[in-house]
Image (tube, coloured by chain):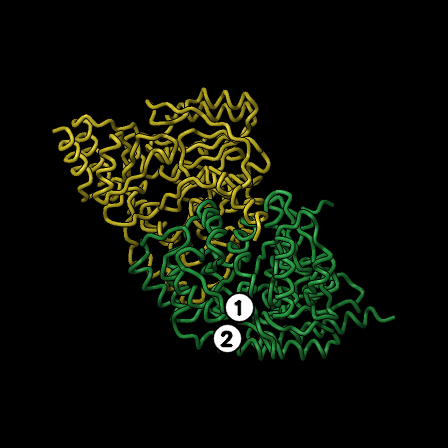
Chain colours: A green, B yellow
Amino acid sequence: MTQEKQKKRGTEVLYSLIAEARGYDDAVVLGRGDPDFDTPAHIVAAAKRAFENHANDYSPPEGILPIREAIAERVQRINGVEVDPNTDIVFTNGGQEALFLMVVAAIGEGDGLLVPEPNYNTYKDAVTFSRGVSVGMPTYPAESFRVDPERVRATLTPDTKALLLVSPNNPAASVISRDDQLALIALAEEHDLLILADDIYDLLIYDDFTHTSPASLPGGKERTLTLNALSKAYAMTGWRTGWVMGPADLMVRVKALKAAVSGPASIVSQHAALAALTGPQEPMEEMREAYIRRRGIVLDYLDQMGFSYGNPQGGQFVFVDIGHTGMSSLELSQKILSRAHVLAYPGGAFSEDMDHFLRITFLQPEDQLRDGLARMKQAMDAISEENAP
Amino acid sequence: MTEGTKATLLRNHGANELLNAPYLAQVPQSDLDFATDHPVTGLEPAVIESTIEAMESGQTHYVDVPGILPLREAVTAHLEGEGVDGYPASSIVVTASLQEARFLALQVITEALPEVALPEVVHPGVKAALGIRPPGLHYLTVERESGMLPPIDAIEQALERGVKLVYLESPARLTGAAFEPSSVERLAGLLESHDAYAIWDQGLSPFVSGRPYLSLGALAGMQERVTLIGEAFPGVGLEGLAIGTIATSERWAKPITSLKQIMSICTATASQYAALKAGEHFDTELGELLASLQVVRQESVEQLTAAGVHVHPGQVASLIALTISQELASSLRERGYRFADGADFGHPGVQRLSVTPGSDVVEMILSQLSEARS
């Protein structure tokens, strides 16, 4: 099977499982990264005002200045990165378009992008689109999926042009420490690499872990394109609100790509995003607290089921080791879905080497989450009994 | 950073003329901006109410990659109302703008058919969309007399050279000229006989007046070969919401949906619900607008022609393409007026202005012209 076919398979597998889950009235989906919370009311109210007053305001491809200014203020406050809203930011149709633009901006035909394993599979899809080559940077559950700079060095090839740093990682939920970020930037400087940083879960960090943006560190800013979005932290997946930021010279290219790919995002979505960034932050805090509670519930059930997992340091999911079942991730995922009507994503869809993992999200109300996990436990008990010698 | 990765990237970018084609907005920047190809009106209150109701009832999440089913069904029904059958909802992809529709259709189909013929005078967004992973390009000459449309003979020659994909605008984005029905029928025969495909931008077709419009997708057997793109319900206030559509065959629908997922997962939910509601009353609303545009355009063309200005042939009531001197164009720009420059389409010397009821733009052109002459 060609590398391209394998890459496409991951996305297709996930979509076929989603379609199967839709066939069950009582399905509990512990897979897809779409928060159950609806968008906070003040953001919807701002959208209504935008529909009434701004629906046909002009926007340049990179977005209206007020949203870029609000993003600049946000990344200064949260990420410690100073950016010029006039030149350094492009507003996008969600984090996905930001990802696509960032990869297409940096990777051309034959160019290599180092991608952490496991990874959100559309990175590889975007690299394939660019006719580039993805090279996996191995991480290990025993090290909580740490991106080890020395292992990264060992994966470099003469064609490597950029390094993808996803922190917290999706699906592994690992956070790259400041020291490792510094070492990775030094490596990028030494080998003249660009850095593509995915900060989409930067507000969803647990325990004592902290998020560090590579662009905030010495030597990082001039070589880093960073994506972020409001989809996850503000429950705005349907609005398609994200951005790419980076040094002005590279952003000229991102801006041209944005114009070529789609032009400006919906003006109403831009105003909704503006309300999210500049309005009350309490709803987002409440959601974050709910995720912390739910994470605890998931980990409790996983312990009861006897699963091990890398400590989820951030994000909205747990990457669960299913190696002891002796089944492939797709096989187990399908069994749980057909027996318990609970969908957990197979790790094999995120990386060939992660076929002994499932990704479980905590993006459901607590009662549904408990119900789904209880059903999953029942199914797992039955599967264990059937498989007992 | 030394000369290396970044410098190479930027040098290649600077040299990519296709990718750096000018960007043309779909929404005017001011009251003196006439650069769009159709006027932008306000949204009906019912559209806003219906959309907000959807948002308040929790429609703020991801939706299906190709778009919400009721909207895709509405697009199919609209096409059928225009005599274009054979594009079921499963073959519709809702996109985050006309430009995304261009990009998806061109990128997916040229991946399989890596040579494309396109008119030498075409919307700059087409060139920009082709600037990423450029395929082999075959430019078709255009005829001034037909409103800058490529003659069917030129398309036939390209097909005879082995080109399997043709990109066409009908109506043309610069002049509003649409292919004659007899030419469309001949083109369909050529696609069939050469086993070729077409991407057909018919976004301006609702504004065609005074002559029947024939879509290439309306002809028997063409649904397998013709991918239709355009804005979703243009002219009823959706322009700022960035929403377009693709109607294609089963062959291309799946890879186009796949690339859409990789690019942006789905189109903004609020935009889709607004388009769904706007589509319900599209024919009535557009009918009223069209009647007013026809009157204004006819009067304007008569005045301009009487003053010796060359107006290019076109059948679209929403725009006028004319040739005026560079000096006059500059003078109008200095006064704050904005037009679409034919140079951006590949035909310098032509200016395109949107027909906008109640504006004084034609009077201003005539007055400036008269001043210059005296």
**Rendered residue at 30%/60% (across/down):** A52
Residue A277 visible at all = yes
**Rendered residue at 36%/37% (across/down):** B205
Residue that numbered label 2 is attached to: A287
User: What is the three-letter code of the residue carrying label 1?
Assistant: Pro
Q: Residue furthest toward the left?
A: B374
| Residue A35 marker | 1
User: What is the three-letter code of the residue carrying label 2?
Assistant: Met
Q: Nearer the viewer, residue A253 or B362?
A: A253
Q: Residue furthest toward the front?
A: B2
Quadrant assignment, res B365 = top left
Q: Position of residue A111 (x, y in %)?
A: 63, 46
Q: Image check: B48 left or right of A168? A: left
Q: Position of residue B352 (x, y in %)?
A: 29, 36
Q: Nearer the viewer, residue B190 or B341?
A: B341
**Rendered residue at 66%/66% (across/down):** A172
Quarter of the C terminus of chain B within the rendering: top left
Q: Are circles 1 and 2 on residues that touch, CB within 8 Å?
A: yes
